[in-house]
Image: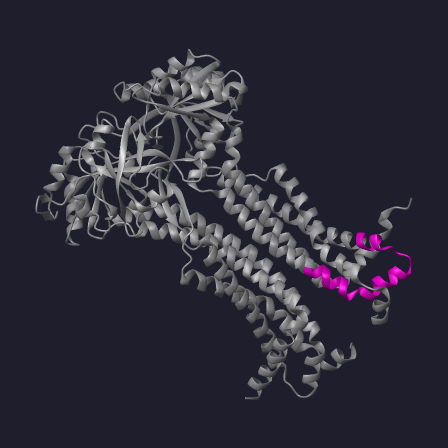
C-alpha cells in the first residue's frame, strides 16, 4: 500500500513539473513518434500488398497452367485442353456444362495517372462462366461488355490509377480502339487492377487463335483437389500443372513481403537505438532536474523502489504518447495510400494498410524502447544517496 | 594572426562537461548517418544500373506491351535510317536453372552485333570468343553466374524457359558453355548470351525479337531519331515505342516500386528527429553554461566569437557522429556486397553519397546550433553573472 502511495506521489510530482522541462520531454516523445511512424509506414506497404493478394480467389477453385511456367502471362493452353480437363473427375457442373473458365491474359501499356511512366496493365479475356468462377467480381457501374464489339469492363483500381480507363473512355491499344462500358470490383483482390473483355475478341486482337493462358476450375469438394490434380497431371493428353487459386496469388506477395519485413527489422533496430539514446538523454536530464525533490522525499522516508518505478513509468508514459502519436500520424498519412507494383510483369494496384494490429505493434515497440531507455536513469535516481544529492544543491 | 585552434580546449571542455550526454548525442547522430549511408546504398542498388546504360542507346519495343514481340526485319529498316550507327536486337529468354527461384538473365542475341557493342566492357579470352561464334548452341556466361552454379567451360547446361516452348513441347534449351567472361559492367556478370539463331530455329523461324537496341551517332539526335522510328512503324501491324535506354531502365524500376520517394521520406523523418535531439543537447548545455558564457563576455570575447564557439561545439559533435556512422555504413555495405551480388549488383556507397553525408552533417550542425545561438543573443550578461 505504502509502495503504491509513494510511487503515485512521485509520479504525480513528475507529471505536474513537466512544463518546467517541456523541451527535453518533447525530444524523447518525438524520438519515439519518429520510430513508430517510419516503422508502421514501411510495414503497411507489405501488409497492404499481402492483403490484396490474399483477398484474391476462392478456396474451391484451382488454376491450371502449362507445365514449366510460373505465371499466367507465360502459360499457354489450347481449346483441346479445355475439353479434356472439363471431363476430369471432381469438376463441378453448371447449367451449360463443366465449370471451367478459359482465360487469356496479356498486358498492355497504359500511362499511370499523374505521371509519365508507362505501366503494364493486365488485360484478361473471359467467357461468361468466369463470373461464376470469380464470385468476388461484380459490376459497380455501367454494364457488361457485349461480345465482338471491342467493349471492356475495367477494375476499379485500374480505372482510378491508369489514364484513359474511366467509364465511357475510349483507349487505343495496338490498332484497336476499346470502349470502357463498365467498372467492376473484386472486393479488394488483384482483378481490380485488370481490364476484362470477352475471350474471342481478345484472342482475335492478339492473333492467338483458340489459345489462352490459364484455366480456372471449380472443385466443390475439398477431397476432389488431390484426385483432380493427380488425374490431370498424369493424363498423357495434357502437359499441365495444377495449383489452388488462392496459393497462386498469395505466393506473389512473398518476395515483396520478405523484402519489406527485412528492411523493417533493420530500420526498427537502428531507429530504435536512436530513440533509446534520445530517451536516455531525456531521462537522465529529468532525473538530474528532480534530484532535489527526490532526495527530499527519500529523507522523509520514501523507499528506493517507488523512485525506480516512478521514473520508469514516466519514461513509459513518454513512450506511450510518442508511440500513439507516431501510429496516428502513420494512419493519417499512409492508410489507404495508393501504390502499385510489378508482379509477374503486370501492374498490381494496392493500398497501404495501417490496421489496428500494426498500430498496436508500433506502440508496443515504443513501450519496449521506453523501458530500455528508462531503466538506467531510474536506477541512478533510486541508488543515489539522498545526502549526496542534497549536498550538491 | 593567431590560430583559431587555440580555442579548441574551450570547445572540448564544453563537450566534456556532461560526458554521457555528449556520447549519447554523438551516438544518435551516428545512427542517423548510418541509416543515411545504408539507404543511399540501397537506392544506388536500384538505380545504379540506369547510369551504366549507354547514353546514345535507344530501346525500341512493342507499343502494346513489353511481352509483345517485334519483327526482326525492323532492325534492317532502322539501320538504313539517318543518324544511326548500329542496331542490335535481343530476345528475353525468361530463363531459369532447375527451379523457378533460380532466375537466369539469359538473352538470345546476334553474337557479332552484341560483341561489337559490349566488347569494351568485356574480358574474354579470344579463343573462347571464337569458339562461341562458331557454336550455334553455345553460350557466353557471366563470371558471376558461372560462380553461383559452378559451371565450367565445355559443360552443357539446361536453360529452362518460362516463356518459350519448343514445338516439341519442352521448355528446356540446352546450351554449351563456350566462354566465361568478366565485365566492368556489374550487371553483365549476371548475364547469359545465346545465339539468336539457336532460339529462332528452335521456335520454328518466327523471326521475332523482344526489343531493338539502336545506337545513335550523336547524342543531340536522340529524341529526333526516337520519334522518327516510332513514326515509321506507327501504321504497321507492330507499332513501336522508343525511349532512351536510361529512361527505359528507370521506368521499369519505377514500375516495381518508387523506392526513391520512400527512402527520402524515411530519411526526412530520421533527420528531423535527430536534429531535435542534437539541438536540444546543445541548448541545454548552453543554458547550463550561461554563467561561464557571461564570464567569457566580460573577458572581452565578442558575441560573434561566442557564436563561433557554439558552432564549433556542434560541428565537433555532429561531424564525429556523422563520420563514424558513414564509415560504419561503408563497412556494412562492403560486407553485404559479396553476399548480395546476385540480387543487387549495384549495391554500393558511392563517393557522391559520402560527400552528401558530409554536406548534410555541416547543415545539420549549423541548424542545431541556431537555437543556442539565439539563446545567447537574448542573454544579458549582468543577469547571467548574477545567476552564476
Q: Is residue A375 above or below residue B114?
A: below
Locate residue A138 relative to residue A370 in the image: left or right. Answer: left
Rendered location of residue B209, percent (x, y): 34, 22
Q: In the figure, is residue B287 to the left or right of B168?
A: right
Residue stretch rendered in magenta on the structure: B280-308
Instruction: Give the residue drawn at x 25%, y 26%.
Output: B166
Query: In this picture, is B224 found above or below A245?
Result: above
Tell me residue A350's x, y (percent): 37, 48
Let me know if residue B236 is in the magenta part: no
Q: Quadrant of residue B81?
A: top left
The quarter holding residue A76 reads: top left
State the residue in front, A192 or A274.
A192
Q: Is residue B325 above or below residue B289?
A: above
Question: How many numbered marks have been drawn onto this rendered protein structure?
Answer: 0
Quadrant housing the N terminus of chain A? bottom right
What secondary structure predominates along the stretch shown in magenta?
Answer: helix
The residue sitting at the top extreme is B80
Amino acid at each position: 500500500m505504502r509502495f503504491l502511495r509513494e510511487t503515485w506521489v512521485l509520479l504525480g510530482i513528475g507529471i505536474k513539473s513537466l512544463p518546467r522541462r517541456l523541451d527535453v520531454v518533447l525530444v524523447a516523445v518525438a524520438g519515439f513518434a519518429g520510430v513508430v511512424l517510419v516503422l508502421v509506414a514501411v510495414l503497411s506497404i507489405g501488409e497492404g500488398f499481402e492483403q490484396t493478394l490474399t483477398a484474391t480467389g476462392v478456396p474451391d477453385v484451382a488454376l491450371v497452367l502449362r507445365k514449366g511456367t510460373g505465371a499466367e502471362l507465360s502459360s499457354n493452353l489450347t481449346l483441346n485442353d479445355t475439353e479434356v480437363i472439363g471431363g476430369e473427375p471432381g469438376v463441378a457442373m453448371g447449367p451449360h456444362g463443366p465449370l471451367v473458365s478459359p482465360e487469356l491474359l496479356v498486358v498492355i501499356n497504359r500511362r499511370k495517372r499523374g505521371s509519365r511512366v508507362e505501366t503494364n496493365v493486365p488485360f484478361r479475356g473471359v467467357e461468361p462462366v468466369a463470373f461464376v468462377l470469380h464470385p468476388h467480381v461484380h459490376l459497380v457501374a455501367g454494364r457488361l461488355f457485349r461480345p465482338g464489339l471491342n467493349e471492356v469492363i475495367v477494375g476499379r483500381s485500374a480505372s482510378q490509377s491508369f489514364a484513359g480507363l474511366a467509364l465511357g473512355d475510349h483507349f487505343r491499344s495496338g490498332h484497336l480502339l476499346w470502349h470502357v462500358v463498365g467498372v467492376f470490383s473484386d472486393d479488394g483482390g488483384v482483378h481490380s487492377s485488370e481490364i476484362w473483355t470477352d475471350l474471342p475478341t481478345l484472342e482475335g486482337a492478339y492473333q492467338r487463335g483458340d489459345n489462352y493462358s490459364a484455366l480456372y476450375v471449380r472443385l466443390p469438394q475439398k477431397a476432389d483437389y488431390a484426385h483432380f490434380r493427380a488425374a490431370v497431371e498424369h493424363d498423357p493428353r495434357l502437359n499441365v500443372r495444377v495449383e489452388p487459386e488462392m496459393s497462386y496469388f498469395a505466393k506473389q506477395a512473398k518476395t515483396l513481403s520478405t523484402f519489406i519485413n527485412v528492411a523493417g527489422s533493420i530500420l526498427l533496430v537502428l531507429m530504435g537505438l536512436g530513440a533509446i539514446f534520445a530517451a536516455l538523454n531525456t531521462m537522465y536530464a529529468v532525473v538530474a532536474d528532480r534530484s532535489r525533490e527526490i532526495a527530499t522525499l527519500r529523507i522523509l522516508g520514501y523507499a528506493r523502489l517507488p523512485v525506480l518505478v516512478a521514473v520508469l513509468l514516466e519514461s513509459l508514459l513518454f513512450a506511450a504518447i510518442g508511440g500513439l502519436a507516431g501510429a496516428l500520424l502513420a494512419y493519417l498519412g499512409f492508410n489507404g495510400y495508393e501504390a502499385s507494383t510489378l508482379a509477374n510483369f503486370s501492374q498490381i494496384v494496392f493500398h497501404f494498410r495501417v490496421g489496428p494490429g500494426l498500430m498496436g505493434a508500433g506502440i508496443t515497440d515504443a513501450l519496449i524502447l521506453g523501458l530500455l531507455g528508462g531503466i538506467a536513469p531510474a536506477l541512478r535516481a533510486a541508488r543515489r544517496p539522498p545526502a549526496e544529492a542534497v549536498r550538491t544543491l | 594572426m593567431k590560430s583559431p585552434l587555440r580555442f579548441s580546449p574551450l570547445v572540448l571542455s564544453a563537450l566534456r562537461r556532461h560526458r554521457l550526454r555528449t556520447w549519447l548525442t554523438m551516438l544518435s547522430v551516428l545512427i542517423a548517418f548510418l541509416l543515411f549511408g545504408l539507404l543511399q546504398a540501397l537506392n544506388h542498388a536500384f538505380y545504379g544500373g540506369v547510369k551504366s546504360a549507354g547514353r546514345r542507346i535507344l530501346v525500341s519495343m512493342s507499343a502494346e506491351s513489353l511481352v509483345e514481340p517485334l519483327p526482326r526485319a525492323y532492325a534492317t529498316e532502322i539501320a538504313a535510317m539517318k543518324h544511326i550507327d548500329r542496331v542490335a536486337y535481343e530476345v528475353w529468354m525468361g530463363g531459369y536453372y532447375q527451379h523457378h527461384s533460380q532466375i537466369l538473365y539469359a538473352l538470345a542475341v546476334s553474337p557479332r552485333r552484341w560483341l561489337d557493342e559490349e566488347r569494351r566492357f568485356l574480358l574474354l579470352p579470344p579463343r573462347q570468343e571464337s569458339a562461341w561464334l562458331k557454336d550455334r548452341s553455345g553460350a557466353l556466361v557471366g563470371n558471376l553466374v558461372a560462380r553461383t552454379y559452378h559451371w565450367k567451360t565445355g559443360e552443357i547446361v539446361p536453360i529452362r524457359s518460362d516463356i518459350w516452348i519448343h514445338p516439341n513441347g519442352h521448355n528446356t534449351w540446352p546450351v554449351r558453355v563456350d566462354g566465361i567472361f568478366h565485365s566492368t559492367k556489374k550487371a553483365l556478370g549476371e548475364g547469359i548470351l545465346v545465339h539468336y539463331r539457336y532460339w529462332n530455329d528452335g521456335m520454328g523461324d518466327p523471326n521475332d525479337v523482344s526489343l531493338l537496341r539502336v545506337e545513335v551517332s550523336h547524342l543531340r539526335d536522340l529524341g529526333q531519331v526516337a520519334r522518327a522510328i516510332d513514326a515509321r512503324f506507327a501504321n504497321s501491324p507492330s507499332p513501336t515505342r522508343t525511349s532512351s535506354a536510361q529512361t527505359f531502365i528507370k521506368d521499369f524500376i519505377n514500375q516495381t516500386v518508387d523506392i526513391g520517394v520512400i527512402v527520402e521520406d524515411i530519411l526526412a523523418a530520421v533527420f528531423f528527429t535527430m536534429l531535435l535531439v542534437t539541438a536540444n543537447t546543445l541548448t541545454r548545455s548552453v543554458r547550463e553554461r550561461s554563467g561561464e558564457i557571461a564570464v567569457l563576455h566580460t573577458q572581452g570575447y565578442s558575441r560573434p566569437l561566442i557564436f563561433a564557439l557554439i558552432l564549433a561545439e556542434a560541428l565537433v559533435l555532429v561531424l564525429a557522429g556523422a563520420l563514424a556512422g558513414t564509415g560504419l555504413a561503408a563497412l556494412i555495405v562492403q560486407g553485404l556486397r559479396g553476399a548480395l551480388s546476385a540480387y543487387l549488383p549495384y549495391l554500393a556507397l558511392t563517393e557522391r553519397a559520402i560527400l552528401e553525408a558530409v554536406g548534410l552533417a555541416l547543415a545539420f550542425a549549423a541548424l542545431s546550433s541556431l537555437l543556442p545561438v539565439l539563446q545567447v543573443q537574448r542573454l544579458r550578461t549582468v543577469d547571467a553573472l548574477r545567476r552564476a
